[in-house]
Amino acid sequence: MAIVHELSWSTSRAATFADCRRQYYYEYYLSWRGWSVTAPQARRRAYLLKKMTRMPMLAGDIVHRAVARWFDGRHQGHVGTEDELARFAIDRLREAYKESRDGGWKRRPSKSTRLAEHHYREPRIEEATGAAATYGKGFVERIRTCIRAFFADPELEGVRESEPRDWLALEEMGTIALFDTKVFAIPDFAHRDDGEVRIWDWKTGSPSPNDRPQLAAYVLYAMEKWDVAPADVICADVYLAGGGVAEERFSRGDVDATLGRIEASMDAMRALHFDADEGEGDPEHFPMIPAGSREARRCGFCNFRELCERA
C-alpha cells in the first residue's frame, strides 16, 4: 500500500503544534518523503534533522526498551535481573553515542542514532575538555536509577507480578479514529487486573503538564480497543528517576472534556493542513517563536534550529 500524507493526531504532535508552529511544519510537512535519497535537498535536510535525538530522549528510549525486554523475557519464562537490564541499557547508550560521534548514523539515518548535541557541537559534549564524560555519566546514572526503581518500587509490584495472559499492550503503536481522524497511541504497558485495566507510562524525566492529557488519551484508546468503561481504567505515570507513581482515574466528564480538547486541537491543525505530497507549502503560514521572547529559550534545544538560523 502506498504511503500517503494525511492529518493524524497524537499527544506529542499536539504538543509540538502548541509549542512552535514552525517546528511542527518542519517535522510533519517539510520532512515528508525526505527519507528518499532522491528527495529535494530541503526535504532531505529536514528529514535528517527530524531523525536526530538528544541524550535525555535517548536515555529515556533505552530505558523503555530495557523494560520491554524484561517483559519479553518474562513471557518466554526468563525473569531478567536488575543487573542484566542495567548492563543492556548502558551498553546501548554507549553504542548509540559512539555511532553518533563517529558518523555511523549516516549510512542508515532512520535506524541509527545522531545526537543533536554532536550535530550542533554543543560544549556539553566536547570530549577534549572532559565535558562529554561528565554529561554522559549523568545519563548512565539516570539509567541505573530508573532500572533500580522498576525492580524495587513497591508500587510496581503488581506490574512485576502480572501474568502474561493478562497483558494487553507493551510498547505497541496503535490507532483509533476520532472525528474522522487517525489518533496514535503507544501505551508503555497495560494489563487486566481484577476486572479493571491498568495503563502504565514510564517517565525518565520530571513531571510535565502534558502527562495527564496523555493518560486521558490512553483512556479513550482503552475504551475502544478493550471495550472498557472509563471508571474501570486506572492510569499511572511512573517517574522512575525518583518522582514516584502518580495514579489517575478519569470520569465520564473527564473523557468528554478530553474529546473536546482533542477536537479543538484537530480543528486548529486542520486549518493549516495541506497535502505534503503536492508540495512543500509555505512556511510563513507556520510562524516561528518570536526571537528574544521567553519561549525562544526552547529554540536552543530544537533539532531544526539551523533552518531558522538560530543555531
Image (cartoon, rainbow, N blue to C red):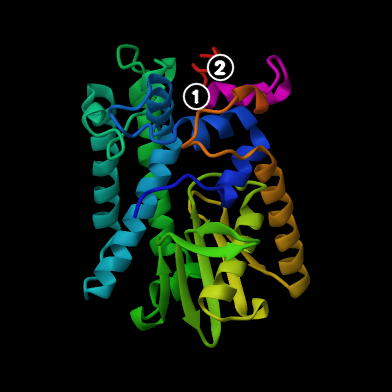
- Does 308 sit above or below residue 242? above
103 or 266: which is nearer to us?
266
Q: Determine the image quadrant of residue 139.
A: top left
Does residue 144 appear in this view? Answer: no
Segment colored magenta: 289-303
- Of the residues shown, which amino acid type is indicated by label 2? Cys
- Of the residues shown, which amino acid type is indicated by label 1? Phe
Does the magenta-highlighted stretch encompass residue 291? yes
Give the x, y percent position of residue 209.
67, 47
Does the magenta-highlighted stretch encompass residue 236? no
- The residue at the point 24 percent across, 42 percent down is 91
Q: Which mark is residue 304?
A: 1
Q: Residues within 10 Å of mark 1 (few under 14, many from 20)?
A: many
Apparent side of residue 257 relative to residue 213 in the rendered image (left or right): right
- Does 227 sit above or below residue 159? below
- The residue at the point 29 percent across, 60 percent down is 69
Spatial distance from mark 2 to mark 1, Cα to Cα? 7 Å
Does residue 259 appear in this view? Answer: yes
Name the residue tied to disc 2: 308
Mark 2 element type: loop
- Does 280 sit above or below residue 62? above
- The residue at the point 51 percent across, 78 percent down is 226
Give the x, y percent position of residue 250.
70, 70
Q: Residues within 10 Å of mark 2 (few under 14, many from 20)?
A: few
